[in-house]
Image: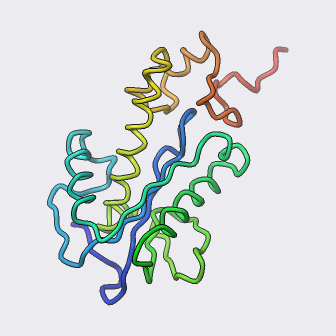
Amino acid sequence: MLILKKHPDLLECGTDEAGRGCLAGPVTAAAVLLPDDFKNPLLNDSKKLTEKNRNILRKIIEKEAISFQVTHVFMDEIQKLNILHASIAAMQRSILQLRPTPEFILVDGNKFTPVTNIPHECIVKGDGKYVNIAAASVLAKTYRDEYMQKIDMEFPMYGWKKNKGYPTKTHRDAIRTHGATKYHRMGFKLLPEQYTLPL
């Protein structure tokens, strides 16, 4: 069962990202401030939910949240920052846009850089432990999936509608056949054989 908040007496937000391990598309983060009476039996780590339930929850979270923000960090910036720092930047930008400003931040994972002077705590697998992180994971995942479905219409051969840019066999086979697109993360190892040299 998910815990509502780590610090019940503080205005606490949860933040999470989606798409860190992808070969294409942005890394997307969300930050969510929920009311103290928020409850939903469907809510869990977004990876454990069906697409249908994620989309149902997205509407509920957006309607009932005190505040929420979602941020994409795109391929050129991922290349400049590296994927870890791009993920943290996406979370920071989402948090800084929340109104009112949170008094405490719960971060999914084990790495974060402080936002101004707001205290934070990193929680490994926090999206399966805290309601506010789980809500952020749902928003980050659904917004990113929506973006990948949109660009799939431009480049349908890569199967992004299904694989969302993750390194599946279908996606990698398409890169071998068609090459990379403007949406691919050129700093990533797009193919397993990319850095091997013929002897």
**Residue 175 position in % (x across, y down):** 59, 18
The relative height of residue 198 versus residue 3 in the rendered view (above or below) is above
Q: Which residue lies furthest to the bottom in this view?
A: 9
Locate the C terminus and report the quarter of the image it occupies. Answer: top right
**Residue 153 position in % (x across, y down):** 43, 21
The relative height of residue 46 versus residue 8 in the rendered view (above or below) is above
Q: In which quarter of the image is residue 181?
A: top right
- Look at 29% across and 71% down and name the residue there: 66
- 45, 97: nearer the viewer: 97
Q: Residue furthest right?
A: 199
- 101, 184: nearer the viewer: 101
**Residue 118 position in % (x across, y down):** 53, 81
Q: In which quarter of the image is residue 116?
A: bottom right
* Scheme by which the image is coloured: rainbow
- Look at 22% across and 60% down and name the residue there: 63
Locate the N terminus and report the quarter of the image it occupies. Answer: bottom left
Q: Residue furthest left?
A: 41
**Residue 38 position in % (x across, y down):** 19, 71
- 85, 98: nearer the viewer: 98
Disc count in the image?
0
- Look at 68% across and 41% down and name the residue there: 76
- Look at 37% across and 63% down and name the residue there: 68
Quick check: 21 left or right of 75? left
